[in-house]
Image (spheres, rainbow, N blue to C red):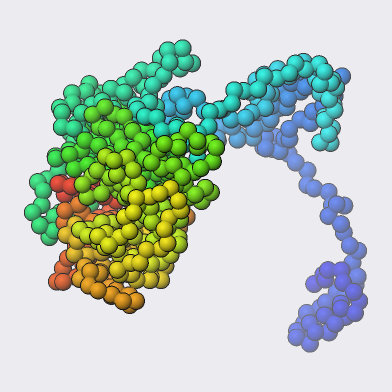
Amino acid sequence: IAMPRVSPRRANGAAQINTKLSPRVKVDTTPKPFVSPANVSPPPIDSSTSSPRSSSPVDLGHYDADVHGSYMDYVKAKRQRNESYMASIGLASAANDIRSSVAASKATQRGISASRKKARQAKSKSEPARRSPRVAGHSAPAGFEVTADSGGKITVSGSLDDLSNPVAPPAKEEFFDGRVNNGEDVNFSHLYDYDEDEDLDDETKADLDASKVEVTAIFEGITGEVAKPKAKKARKMLSTSSPASSPDSYISRFASLSVNDESCVAKVTKERIYAMEMAPTPHKIIVAAGDKHGNVGIWDTSNPGFKENGVVTSKPHSSVVTHLEFKPDSSKMLSVSYDSTVRELDIETGVYRQIFGTYNTDDVCEQFKGSAGYGIDEGTGYFLQYGCYDAAHNGVFMTTSQGQVLHYDCRADRVTFNTQVSNKKLNSFSLSGDLFAVAGNERVVRVFDIRKFSKKAWNGKRPSNVQQAVASREYGGSINSAFFSPSGDHLLTTCQNDTLTLTPRSALSSPHSKEEFAVGQTIKHDNHTGRWLSTFMARWHPSMDIFVVGSMQKPRRLQFFGPCKGAFKLQAAVSGDTVSAVSSRNCFHRTEPVAAGGNASGRVVIF
């Protein structure tokens, strides 16, 4: 046995040990010379069997103006050298094969398409991404010349005096709080408008014109008029069955449902969905969704032959659209946003009108001094968190990031009240009869009697002190939402401590001292969606005491709960091939046994 080179003491010790263990083993303890790997010659390579991979790219050396000519010629030579080397080792052909296989296996995307995205991006006239002049294909400015490039050090000759003064780009118009405008109307089809002299190809202009026609056709369908667009293909609309007469028969439809049809899914918004609503149109499924960047998409499932499968988009806000709500007659749709504006879309005209917006008292807001929201905005960290119509649909209730509740009267154009009810953000508002509930990051659900609520007309000063609630309860985590059922008999709470709780109205309306109200039922439910998904907000059916909520379980599903023997239980969990992501925000159709779920990629699935 030839031992590696070690000290004589260690070698002798090893020899003694091995001798004792096996006398027959003879150990050669003679020191051997150390052979460095650098002194070992590699075996000869047969050039006839060698692979092209053994070659290496040609070294062009550091840039030298006398040797390589212009610097651009040197860069082109390096690029040609690299392309030739990659082709010689088979990398270029392998990359082409991978691209071909990926393109062949990629699923067809329904809804907003990449080509139409480019058209809208061109229309938005946003500032182009910064690129170096060399990459952009522009020649170097006169007066400067690269003379050497060695060791990471570039030598340039010339002076600034030889350059003409660059012309600064025109300043982009900015609006208060980064909003889309200063409160002017926004046409739903404004993203599809263009000027004749714009640098757009004929195909893009034709697509934009077709989209404007589709917007008109879809809106006519919402208001009840018959739309007759020239669709590319004749495809049947998503089928709907007759409305269910009871919660049991309604929810039984979902118990046997599996969503596998590709026509039941479409990309409706560009980014993560925060708000969902379905138009209350009978026998017609139209879904509206709002995303994190202020985009609102409307999907008419009865017009799949349109260019984007019946999806049209608009941008009435500059930040998260936190709530969408149709009026019962489908004539208008409310949209509330983190940009602290409330807009109402007139379905007949297709125009968003700003009905309310908050402003501070800085000089930049002097022009809004006569508006109802002037002086309400408290500056950094203040925004509208949630909002909804009041019972008569003539006003809007709103909650803020600073814990206030507001009511704006649309007819009188004034703020009815602006009252502090919490010390932290309020995520939801729900009114049922004389009671309304608010909840948020303070981990407390508070219930107020609106008859006893401070309704002093707002005087332009800071909100009054925290109002006393008639009932409240502290939870073990932040509360995503607290909504009354359509009957008003239950208060449904979605909490970050992984629970859904239901509280009977009797526990809220009876007189209370400082004791917390008692929860009627607690359902364990994983509500930890993480930072990349919208939070869960369990939502009631508009007219029946059943609710829907997303799920973190796999395979992905939508869960439906209904009454059973005096308690609410999971009655259906709907999944399918097209349900590939978590549906965080969901809603029901008002009359049809249909639900819709929106996910973080902007896609909507019809259940």
Q: Quadrant of residue 409?
A: top left
Q: Which of these two is toward me, 305 or 374?
A: 374
Kindly identify the residue that appears in the image at 32 percent across and 49 percent down: 416
Q: Which of these two is toward me, 492 or 376?
A: 376
Task: From the top left corner, tell me how far across and down residue 551 is, in percent.
Answer: 33, 59
Vertical position of residue 604 compared to residue 512: above or below? above
Kindly identify the residue that appears in the image at 21 percent across and 47 percent down: 392
Quarter of the image where the N terminus is located: bottom right
Task: From the top left corner, tell me how far across and down residue 130 is, in percent.
Answer: 62, 30
Kindly identify the residue that appears in the image at 50 percent across and 40 percent down: 177
128 displayed left or right of 66:
left
Vertical position of residue 118 compared to residue 556: above or below? above
- Extreme residue in the bottom direction: 20
Query: Is residue 537 visible in the rendered structure shown here?
Result: no
Q: Which of these two is toward me, 546 or 451?
A: 451
Vertical position of residue 403 compared to residue 321: above or below? below
Q: Which of these two is toward me, 510 or 369?
A: 369
Task: From the top left corner, tell me how far across and down residue 306 is, in percent.
Answer: 27, 27
Task: From the top left corner, tell me how far across and down residue 41 is, in percent.
Answer: 83, 48
Query: Is residue 188 visible in the rendered structure shown here?
Result: yes
Vertical position of residue 33 compared to residue 224: above or below? below
208 displayed left or right of 238:
right
Kindly identify the residue that appears in the image at 23 percent across and 26 percent down: 217
Instruction: Please tell me how many numbered marks the rendered image carries.
Output: 0
